[in-house]
Image (cartoon, rainbow, N blue to C red):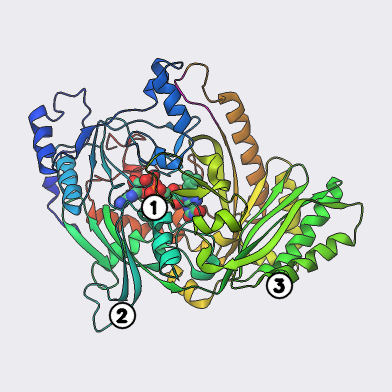
C-alpha cells in the first residue's frame, strides 16, 4: 500500500546536479539555510588540499590527522573508508545539513524531495561500500545529534498494556558506540549491544544488523532495538516499534541503512553486565603445511567442544604462512575458567613437539566487566589497547581499539564475507571444514568472526534476532568468515595513489580463497555491512528470503526511491550512482 498519490513522484526520473538548469536557485538554498538556522553549508573536500599541493601546509595538516577516526568523523566531506579500488572513492556532497534536531532532518528531506535531489545520510561514516557519500548530493549529517539518555522503565509508544517496562537507552542518531558504552557500561554499570569498532555510528550499525564483541551472548544490535524515530520520504516524523508502524520497525532492524528514512534517535534494550569480560590472545605457528592442516583440524574440534557457546566471541585468523592467530573475547568467565579452557588446546599442541610453536605473548584473562570500555582504567591495567584522539579539546573517552587503527582512512582492495553453517562442526563435517580453511588460506588470510554467527547463542538472543530483517543464515552460522585486504593511498593525489595493480591481484586472491569456503557453504549468504561491493545476487546474499518483504515495505514508505544506497533494497531500479531511474 502506498502512503501518497503516485502523481507526487511520477515525474522524478533523474536527480538534479549542480550543472543542471533546474538545480535549486541561490534563493531556494537560502530558504533552507534559514529554515535549519544556518546549519546548511557547502561541503569542503579536505583531500583537495593534497590534490592541489601535496607539499603544502594544508595537505601536511590533513595527513597528520587522517588516521584519527574522530578527526575524520568531524569532516562532512570525508568518510572513514576512503574508497574501494574499481568501486568508489569518497566524494563530498554539494551541501550538508549538519542536523541538530529532527526538524533539521525533516527540512532537508522535504527540500531534497521537492527539488528532486540525490539525498545522502551519514552518521559514523563507516560504510565500507561508500553508502554515506555521493557527489552532487544533499547530505544529512547527524554527527551533532549524540545525546544519550538512560531509562529505568521504558515502554515503546503505543505499547503500554502489552509491553512491560524495561531498562533501555535512547541515543541520538549521530552517537557512536564509544559514547553509548561510556554512558551505559562505564558510567551506569549495564550493557547495550553495539558494534566492535568504537567509532561506528549507532544508527548505521543497528540498520545493518550489527555485531559486537559479545553478540554471541546478546544477539545483534538490531535484535535489541525497541523503538526508532524516523523521518520518512514524505517528511513525516514517525515512531517505529513493535506496536506502531511495526513493518517499518522490522525493516529498520537489519534492512540496511539509508534506505527507509532518516533515523533521528533509537532506543535500545539495556542488559545486566556479567561480573567479568575477558579474552584469549595467542598464536601458533606450524612447521609445515601438513602440520598446519592438522592444527586446523584440531582447532575445529576444540572449537566445537569448548568454545561453541555464548561465552566466546570474536576471532581466529588463519594465515597463509601457517599461523593460527587467536584473538577471542569471553563473557562471564573468570581468568581461571578462561585459562582452563585454553589449557586443553595448549596441551594438545604440546603433544606434537617440533610441529608447533606458540609465538609471542599468550594472554588469557578477565577484567571487571564495567571496565571493558573504560579508557582511563585501561591506561594502567591493559597494554595499549586503546588509541586516543590527540587533538586539543578531545574528551577522555574519544578512543578506538588499536586493532581497528589499520582501517582508518584505508582504501579497500577486496572484501568478502560468508556465513558458515554450524552443521560444519558436526563430527562427520569437521574434516571438510578444516580442509576448506586450509585450501582457502593458501590464497589469503581468513578471519573467522565467531560473534557474527549466532548459532550457540542463548534462546532469547536467537528469538529476538530471528525477528529482524537480516539474512536468517546468520542464526544458523557458527561464524562469519571475512577475507579482506586494503591499503593506503589517496586517489587523485600525485605520488600517493593507491596501488591499483596490487589491489586487483589481492581481490582475485580473496575471491579464490572464498571460492574454497563456498564449496562447503554454498548458500551461506553475506553480511550486508561487511561484504563485497561487487556482490552477485546481493538481494539474496544479504537478506535471503526476507528480501521480498523488505522490497514491499520500501515501496510503501519510499515509493519514489528518495533514499538510495548501492546494493540497498530497491536500488536495482536506479543507475549505479543513484541519479537515474531505470
Ligand atoms: C573499521 C570498521 C569496523 C567495523 N566493525 C563492525 C563491527 O564490529 N560489527 C559490525 O556489525 N559492523 C562493523 N562495521 C560495519 C559498520 O557497522 C557498518 O558499516 C555501519 O553501517 C556503519 O555505520 P556508520 O553510521 O558508522 O556509517 P555511515 O557510513 O554513516 O552509515 C552507514 C549506512 O547507514 C546509513 N545511515 C547512517 N545513519 C543513518 C540514519 N540516522 N538514518 C538512516 N540511515 C543512516 C548511511 O546512509 C549508510 O548507508 C565496521 C566498519 C568499519 C569501517
Q: Which mark is residue 205?
A: none
Q: CA distance from mark 1 to mark 3?
A: 33 Å
Disc 2 crowd rating (10 Å Cα; few below 14, some 14-19, many 20+) is some
Q: Is 25 placed left or right of 193 in the picture?
A: left
Q: Quickly name the residue at label 1.
A: 176
The span shown in magenta is 488-493
Q: Is 27 placed left or right of 356 in the picture?
A: left
Q: Is mark 1 within 8 Å of ligand 1?
A: yes
Query: Which element carries disc 3, helix, strand or loop?
Result: helix
Q: From this viewpoint, is residue 537 visible?
A: no
Q: Horizontal and vertical percent for residue 84?
A: 49, 34
Q: Quickly name the residue at label 3.
A: 336
Disc 3 crowd rating (10 Å Cα; few below 14, some 14-19, many 20+) is few
Query: Which element carries disc 1, helix, strand or loop?
Result: loop
Q: Is 432 placed left or right of 508 in the picture?
A: right
Which of label 2 and label 3 is nearer to you? 3
Amino acid at each position: 500500500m502506498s502512503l501518497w498519490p503516485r502523481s507526487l513522484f511520477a515525474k522524478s526520473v533523474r536527480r538534479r546536479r549542480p550543472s543542471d538548469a533546474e538545480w535549486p536557485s541561490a534563493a531556494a538554498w537560502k530558504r533552507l539555510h534559514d529554515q535549519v538556522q544556518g546549519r546548511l553549508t557547502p561541503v569542503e573536500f579536505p583531500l583537495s588540499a593534497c590534490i592541489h599541493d601535496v607539499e603544502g601546509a594544508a595537505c601536511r595538516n590533513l595527513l597528520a590527522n587522517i588516521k584519527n577516526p574522530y578527526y575524520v568523523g568531524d569532516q562532512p566531506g570525508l568518510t572513514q573508508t576512503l574508497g574501494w579500488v574499481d568501486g568508489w572513492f569518497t566524494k563530498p556532497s554539494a551541501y550538508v545539513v549538519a542536523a541538530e534536531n529532527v526538524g533539521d532532518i525533516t527540512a532537508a528531506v522535504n527540500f531534497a524531495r521537492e527539488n528532486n535531489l540525490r539525498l545522502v545520510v551519514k552518521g559514523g561514516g563507516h560504510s565500507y561500500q561508500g553508502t554515506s557519500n555521493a557527489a552532487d548530493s544533499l547530505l544529512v549529517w547527524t554527527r551533532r545529534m549524540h545525546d544519550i539518555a538512560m531509562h529505568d522503565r521504558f515502554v515503546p509508544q503505543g505499547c503500554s498494556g502489552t509491553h512491560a517496562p524495561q531498562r533501555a537507552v535512547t541515543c541520538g542518531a549521530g552517537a557512536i558506540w564509544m559514547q553509548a558504552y561510556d554512558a551505559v557500561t562505564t558510567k551506569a554499570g549495564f550493557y547495550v549491544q553495539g558494534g566492535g569498532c568504537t567509532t561506528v555510528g549507532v544508527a548505521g550499525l543497528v540498520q545493518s544488523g550489527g555485531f559486537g564483541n559479545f553478540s554471541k551472548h546478546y544477539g545483534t544490535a538490531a535484535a535489541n532495538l525497541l523503538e526508532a524515530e524516523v523521518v520518512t520520504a514524505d517528511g513525516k516524523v514517525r515512531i517505529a516499534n513493535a506496536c506502531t508502524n511495526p513493518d517499518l520497525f522490522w525493516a529498520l532492524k537489519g534492512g540496511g541503512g539509508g534506505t527507509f528514512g532518516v533515523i533521528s534517535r533509537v532506543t535500545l534494550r539495556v542488559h545486566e553486565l556479567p561480573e567479568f569480560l575477558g579474552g584469549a590472545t595467542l598464536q601458533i605457528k606450524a612447521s609445515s603445511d601438513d602440520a598446519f592442516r592438522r592444527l586446523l583440524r584440531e582447532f575445529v574440534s576444540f572449537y566445537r567442544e569448548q568454545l561453541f557457546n555464548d561465552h566466546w566471541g570474536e576471532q581466529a585468523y588463519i594465515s597463509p604462512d601457517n599461523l593460527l592467530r587467536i584473538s577471542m573475547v569471553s563473557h562471564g568467565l573468570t581468568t581461571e575458567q578462561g585459562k582452563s579452557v585454553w589449557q586443553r588446546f595448549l596441551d594438545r599442541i604440546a603433544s606434537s613437539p617440533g610441529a608447533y610453536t606458540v609465538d609471542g605473548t599468550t594472554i588469557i584473562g578477565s577484567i571487571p566487566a564495567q571496565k571493558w570500555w573504560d579508557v582511563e582504567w585501561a591506561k594502567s591495567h591493559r597494554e595499549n589497547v586503546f588509541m586516543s584522539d590527540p587533538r586539543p579539546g578531545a574528551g577522555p573517552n574519544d578512543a578506538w581499539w588499536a586493532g581497528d587503527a589499520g582501517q582508518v582512512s584505508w582504501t579497500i582492495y577486496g572484501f568478502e564475507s560468508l556465513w558458515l553453517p554450524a552443521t560444519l562442526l558436526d563430527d562427520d563435517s569437521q574434516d571438510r571444514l578444516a580442509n576448506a580453511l586450509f585450501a582457502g588460506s593458501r590464497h589469503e588470510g581468513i578471519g573467522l568472526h565467531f560473534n557474527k554467527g549466532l548459532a550457540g547463542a542463548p534462546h532469547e538472543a536467537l528469538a529476538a534476532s530471528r525477528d529482524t530483517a537480516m539474512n536468517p543464515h546468520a542464526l544458523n552460522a557458527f561464524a562469519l568468515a571475512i577475507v579482506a585486504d586494503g591499503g593506503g593511498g589517496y586517489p587523485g593525489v600525485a605520488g600517493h595513489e593507491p596501488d591499483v595493480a596490487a589491489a586487483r591481484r589481492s581481490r582475485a586472491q580473496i575471491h579464490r580463497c572464498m571460492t574454497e569456503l563456498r564449496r562447503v557453504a554454498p548458500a551461506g549468504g553475506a553480511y550486508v555491512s561487511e561484504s563485497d561491493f561487487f556482490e552477485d545476487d546481493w538481494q539474496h546474499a544479504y537478506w535471503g528470503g526476507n528480501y521480498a518483504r523488505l522490497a514491499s515495505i520500501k515501496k510503501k514508505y519510499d515509493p519514489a526511491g528518495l533514499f538510495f544506497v548501492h546494493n540497498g533494497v530497491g536500488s536495482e531500479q536506479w543507475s549505479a550512482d543513484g541519479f537515474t531511474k531505470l
